[in-house]
Each structure stands twice: as structure tokens, then as C-alpha cells.
Image: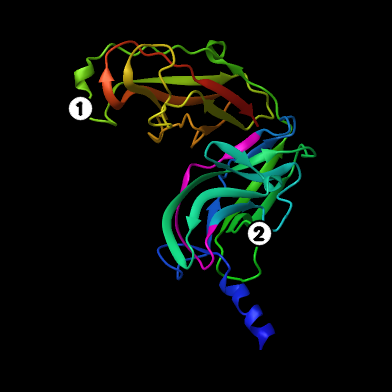
Amino acid sequence: MLALLMAMPLTSHALGCWNGNNSSGSVTSTLNLPGNLYVSANAPAGTIIWQSSLQSLSLYCAQSIGENVYFWVNPKKLTLAPGLQIGIIFNGQTYTQNSGAINSNIYVPRNGSVSTNLPYSIVLLKTTGAPSSGSSTVSQYPVFQLDGIGGLNAQQGINFNQMINGTVTFTPGGTCDLSANGQYTINLPTVASGLFTSVGSALARNSFTISASNCSTGVRTATFRFSGKADATNPVLFANTGGSAQGVAINLGSSADGANIGANSSNNTRVVNVQSQAAQLGLFVEYMRTADVVAGSLQTAVTIDMLYQ
């Protein structure tokens, strides 16, 4: 009887996480890769080939002993494709299988539960050994599992798994020529500080286009990745780093979908098909209020990394 009493609590201690509001929710969610996902054989190892938009998982977790929730990337340790590995971006940091337990900072109290939203992006990273042609298809490939610090438990059906489906195509790669030598200066007009009606209000949107031309015949897509100093109040926005104005930052977005491009590495890549050896990406910038506005000047710098595939 003593052995039985000692053994029974083991499964009841297991951390469980479901997509939804309670333990009847799903334990899987599948994201489909884009149809134009190409991998250049000459891209450096460690390059982010593709990044998903920011995912916001509605999560319910329960536990009997009190424990934090952790990401375990590539829980089954499966090879994704030659020259590729899976990863996630969480709180602006990139993690892979080698990262081990990644703390989500979600704490489930003893004999309790928690409902929350968990934001993250999925990324594909280039490794060595990618072929210069061919394709590879993945079906229900596990990106990560949510579990405790001790690792993956053996109890089935209680731990959320993010999955992906899709096909990646390998190309020999090449380069393109950037317009304006890759240097773009956007001047926004002067606006009155009193016109910002509330936090989150935007003014003076200015649209522009980044162009790539004379692309090598092996190039199928151009991937643009944006980075810069994030605003302290709203880290999706780009901070005022060279001016005296306060309470205002810069919102950058893509014209095609109107979506933000995050300074904090959230949803910060855009992929454009190369057609007739050229590609164009439409963008916009605008002022956005983050707090009480103090009049002055505003200046920021955005770095654009480009990958041709």
C-alpha cells in the first residue's frame, strides 16, 4: 500500500496546458508555411529564413505543485529538412532546441490554474548542409511543447504542442541590387502636438517603396527584416533616438496589409516574390502617441537586413 500511495501522485503533478479556457481545449495548433518559402544554398548559417507573424495563444494551464510553464523547442528532436532547423522568437530572443527549457514567465500556482495569452513567433533558421535544389515537405512537425522545468512528461494529451505544415524549396541563390544604395531617408511633416487626441493616435502617414532589381536568375524571393531601438512605452514602435520630443514614437508598417513591423522583433520580416528579376516592398511610417506629448524634434534609425532566396 505504501508503494501505491507513493506512485499515485506522479501523474497528478504533471503540468497541463490547453489552447482555450479550460482543460477541454485543444492540445495542438497547426500553422501553414507560406507557399513561396525558398532557401538559398549560399545564405550564411544562422540566417533566419522565415519568421511567422506574431502568434497570440489563448492558454489555460493547471498544476498541483506550483510551477512555471516552459517552451521546449523541437520536443521530439526531429530533423526538419537538410540545412534547416526550427526555432521561436520570444520576448525578442531567438531560441532553438539547444536552448533547453525556455521560461515563459507564466506561473501556475499550487493546486490552481491560470488563463492567459502567450505571444511568440516561429522561425526557420539556416544551418549547414542545405542543397542547392529540390524541396522538402513537413506534416504536423512539432515546433515546441509547453511543459515544466523537468522536461517532457509521459502523460499524453495534456501538453500543448505547436505544429507546422508546408514545403520548403532549395535554390542556388544569388543577389539583387537595391535602389538608393540601400539608404532611405523619410521626412515627415511638422504637426501640432495637440492634434494627438489620445495614446495610440497616429498622424502624418508617409508611404514609400523599397526596390530590388537585377536579381540573379536563381533568386525567387527577397526577405526584408527590420530592427531598431524599441520605444520604452510601446516596444512595437521605434523610439525617438535623435530628437527632443517626448511621448511620440514612429510606427512602421507594410502597405499591403497595414500591419505593424515591430521594433521588438515581433512580426518584423516581410517576404516579396521576385518577378522579372525585381521585387518591391511598400511601407509606411507615421507618428504615434505613446504618452503625454512634449513638442520637439523626432528622429530614429531603422536597419533593414535583406536576404535573397
Q: Which of the labelled discs sits on residue 66, or is there none? A: none
Q: Residue at x 55, y 68 (%)?
A: 158
Where residue 137 appears, as percent x and y from the top left, is 67, 52
Q: Which of the labelled discs sits on residue 150, or is there none? A: 2
Asked whether residue 274 is in view, the answer is no
Quarter of the picture holding the C terminus: top right
| Left or right, residue 100 beside residue 165 | right
Q: Residue at x 45, y 65 (%)?
A: 112
Q: Could you tell me what secondary structure mostly forms the magenta stretch?
A: strand
Q: Residue at x 67, y 24 (%)?
A: 216
Q: Residues within 10 Å of mark 2 (few under 14, many from 20)?
A: few
| Residue position marked by numbered label 1 in the rendering | 197
Q: Nearer the viewer, mark 2 or mark 1?
A: 2
Where residue 131 appears, as percent x and y from the top left, is 78, 39
Observer-nearest residue: 256 or 162?
162
Observer-nearest residue: 268 or 111?
111
Q: Residue at x 62, y 71 (%)?
A: 155
**Amino acid type of the residue tagged 2 in the rendering:** Gly
**Amino acid type of the residue tagged 1 in the rendering:** Thr
Mark 1 lies on a secondary structure that is loop
Q: Is residue 214 magenta?
A: no
Query: Magenta segment, which residues?
Result: 48-67
Asked whether residue 186 is in view, the answer is yes
Count of residue discs: 2
Mark 2 lies on a secondary structure that is loop
Q: Residues within 10 Å of mark 1 (few under 14, many from 20)?
A: few
User: Eyeballing the image, is 144 above or below 277?
Assistant: below
Q: Is residue 65 magenta?
A: yes
User: Eyeballing the image, is 283 above or below 122?
Assistant: above
Where residue 290 appears, as percent x and y from the top left, is 32, 28
